[in-house]
Amino acid sequence: MNRIITVPNILSIIRIVLIPVYAVMYVRADTTADYILAGGILAFSCITDLFDGWIARRFDQISNLGKALDPIADKATQGVVLICATSRHPALWCLVGLFALKEGFQLVMGCWYLRKKQMLSGALMTGKICTTVLFVCMIIIVCFPNLPDIAVYAMIVPSAVFMAISFVSYILAYFGKNKKVEDIVLKKDT
C-alpha cells in the first residue's frame, strides 16, 4: 500500500488548502451569509480533522507523512482562525498569546527530542479536548460576528482554561515523572 497517498493524508492536505480560503472569506465578510460561509469552511475543516485520525487508525493508514501533516494542519488552522478573529474581537489576543506560548513550547521540545531521535507517541487527550473546545468556540464567534463582548468572553474563558490544562499536560509529558517521550520507530512510506 502506498503510505503517502492515503485518505487521511488527502484530508490533511485539504485542511491546509482551506486555511487561506477561510482567511480570505472571513476577512472579506460583510454579511451574515459571508460569516456563516466562513464558519462553514471552518466546521468542514474540523470535521475532516476528526475523520482523518479515525480513518488512519481504523484502516491502518497511519504514515510518517500523516504524523507530520495532521498537526501542521491543526496548528496552522487554529493560529489563522485566532488571528483573523482578533480583527473583530481584540479580546482574543490573550488567547493568541497563550496559543503561541503553548505551541512554541511544543515546537521547541519536539525539535529537541527529535534531535535525540525521540518524540511523543501522539497527541494527548487534553490536547484533543483543547482543540475541540477551541474550534467549537471559534465557529460560534465566526458565525456570529456581532456577539456582545460578554458572549465573546464566555468563549474565551473555556478555550483558555482547556489550553492551559493542555499546556501543563504537555509540560508533564516532556518532563514529568511519567514522561511520554519514546524512541522513534520509522516505518517506510512505500
Image (tube, rainbow, N blue to C red):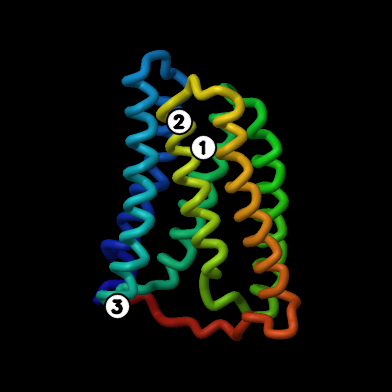
- Disc 1 and disc 2 in contact, CB within 8 angstroms: yes
Disc on res. 142: 2
User: Residue 98: x percent and y percent?
Assistant: 70, 47
In the rendered view, would you say 66 is above or below 83?
Answer: below
The structure residue drawn at horizontal position 67% and vertical position 75%, both measured from the top left corner, is 173
41 left or right, relative to 168: left
- Give the labeled residue for mark 3: 60
The structure residue drawn at horizontal position 68% and vertical position 85%, both measured from the top left corner, is 178
- Give the labeled residue for mark 1: 81
User: Residue 120: x percent and y percent?
Assistant: 59, 75
153 left or right, relative to 146: right
Depth check, mark 1 against mark 2: the one in front is: 2
The C terminus - image quarter:
bottom left
Residue type pointed to by label 2: Val
The structure residue drawn at horizontal position 52% and vertical position 73%, both measured from the top left corner, is 122
132 or 34, which is in the foreground? Answer: 132
In which quadrant of the rendered view does residue 121 lie? bottom right
Q: Distance between the residues labelled 3 and 2?
A: 35 Å
10 Å crowding of disc 1: few (<14), some (14-19), many (20+): many
Q: Quick one: label 1 or label 3, which is nearer the N terminus?
A: 3
In the rendered view, would you say 126 is above or below 185?
Answer: above
In which quadrant of the rendered view does residue 179 lie? bottom right
User: Residue 30: x percent and y percent?
Assistant: 42, 14
